[in-house]
Amino acid sequence: MTIPPAVTAARALVADLVSRGVADFVLAPGSRSAPLAYAVAEAADAGRVTLHVRIDERAAGFLALGLSKGAEGAPVAVVTTSGTAVANLHPAVLEASHTGLPLILLTADRPHELRGTGASQTTDQVGIFGSAVRFAVDVPAPSGSQGAAGGPDAEPGAPSAEELRDLRSVTGRAASAALGFRSGHPGPVHLNLAFRDPLTPSAPLPGLPADTALEGYPRPDPPLVVPAMLQHVASPALPGDPARTVVVAGDGAGTDARQLAEVQGWPLFAEPSSGATGGPNSIAAYRALLGSEDLAGSIEQVVVLGRPTLSRPVQRLLGRPDVTVSVVAPGAGPWPDAARNAAVVLPGVAPAWFETSTPPPSAFLERWRAAGAQASRVLDDVTCDEAVLGGPTALSVARAVAAVLGPDDLLVVGSSNPVRDLELVLGLDGPGPAVLANRGLAGIDGTVSTAVGVALAAARRGLRTRALLGDLTFLHDVGGLLRGPDETPVDLEIVVVNDDGGSIFATLEHGALAATSSTANATFERVFGTPHGSNLAQLCAGYGVDHQLVKDVPTLRHALQAPSHGIQVIEVRVPRADRQTESTELARRIVAAVQE
């Protein structure tokens, strides 16, 4: 049986990626990418990989991102056809780039002789993702050369051994770059793969060889790739006086941040997606507490791990000229220093920082702990069931979600208000769940698809996943609910806090301006508030997804505790009109409580 060069090359590429640890492929359908589609389907039928099919490339990209998040940074491949399909991956590629997730983008393209000729669905895909990818290469179409260069059983028109060897060399470099083996800076990579007709096999394929290397075509000896070694500073000493130091744990900081704070006896300001929340030094409502000039003024030094993304008060702290800022940033990626005030950038946490015995709590730490306890009491007052008898608030919904979920649960939280609400209430009722969020660029796009990907990957580890999203975030990626009948089942509860618009803007300066006049308010509603009036129940019905509208917090807790299967949307409607006033009043009450 003659196997076209495009199909043979695609099979070799897929087999090689499988051998390098790629277990999930996300495919959006298309014609030019057909060789890859056949190869991945073949591998899936053989039980070698899991195939996920989505009709929307943007949803496919964010699904892959979620799969990688849920699998703790495993590489995931995305397959698309040519043209606008490739461009639709860009939002997920940018998010993966800024969060360091290893996506392998396999985009099909016309052969070089058809580019620039007006051929259908052909555009310049080379370098389309710019600096967002760690590695990019334009792979020419296999020529179909034959003869002595081919394998012993090569069919006429099959790629030469040299072509397959070159292809495997490229995939090896791509996989190494995606995982950050040499740079310590993982992220997306792009293989733009040209294919010539014919794109389909003339008969069903016989199946991938058991050893993943095509018989008769030697696989090149892999290069020696040494993972980046984390260079630690030799001394535990920091540039400033450590007595009045706090640890800021941004997105992806990891457990080192919490351990460092506890060993050194420093207050911890941890974002929900930092991986460092909880513990005796974690300070509740720290962003509101920084509104106290006396309390904030006591800080002389900050150690930053991860990427702080949520809080303007934290950024103001990091930009203060009287505060010494030390940034811990392993790998070759850019270090976080939006305030341009870092005194030193360290490639890692020195082991000696952890070797000291935990000191007794200092007066500085005790003061911050007491302030956090006061803030917690204020937050409890405004979010307890008695306080929301008139109907749930966004903050009470976030607390209910955090209270129900435990350390063995995963929570994907959307950008804008949900992640900020969660930051205030996480820990009020116990340790709460592990939290994942798309904080690389903090966009609202693709979050439903990301949550589905997380849920699929997490289920393999026996973890249950929920999501907490705002209504605009949900609507922006409602297409992520669309799944074919042959797709892998997924269990996911999505809590949608529906305030009919973008209430995040009400908490910023735009909300204050809107309060000055009816004209300003009308402008705010049109261009910032963006009310939509959408019926989420009908949307869910159209996608065949269960929907439940809950009207109070106890019912929400009950719904989250009940067994569920498949994707379920739990909608909670909350008011938006008073969000700016409520936010300002809450901050005032917290500051007043610590000054009493």
Image (spheres, helix red, strand yellow):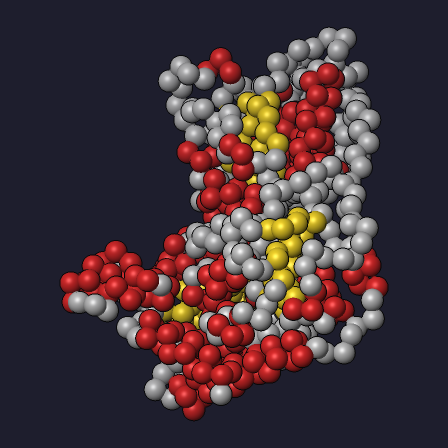
Residue in the picture at 56% in, 60% down: 322
The image quadrant of residue 318 is: bottom right
The image quadrant of residue 149 is: top right
Identify whether 79 is placed above or below 294. Answer: above
Residue 280 left/right relative to 122: right
Residue 498's x, y, as percent? 36, 69
The residue lying toward the viewer, choosing from 290 and 381, is: 290
**Is residue 554 shown to the viewer in this render?**
no
Residue occupying the far bottom of the picture: 386
Residue 385 left/right relative to 278: left
Residue occupying the far left of the picture: 519
Identify whether 249 is placed above or below 132. Answer: below
Residue in the picture at 63% in, 66% down: 246
Residue 458's x, y, as percent? 64, 60
Identify whether 377 is placed above or below 313. Answer: below
**Is residue 350 shown to the viewer in this render?**
yes
Residue in the picture at 58% in, 71% down: 298
The residue lying toward the viewer, choosing from 263 and 558, is: 263
The residue lying toward the viewer, choosing from 575 and 87, is: 575
Q: In this figure, what is the number of numbered marks?
A: 0
Identify whether 10 is placed above or below 381. Answer: above
Residue 495's x, y, as percent? 46, 69
Residue 418 left/right relative to 194: left
Residue 346 left/right relative to 534: right
Residue 132's x, y, as percent? 54, 37
Residue in the picture at 48% in, 40% down: 89
The image quadrant of residue 406 is: bottom right
Image quadrant occupied by the N terminus = top right
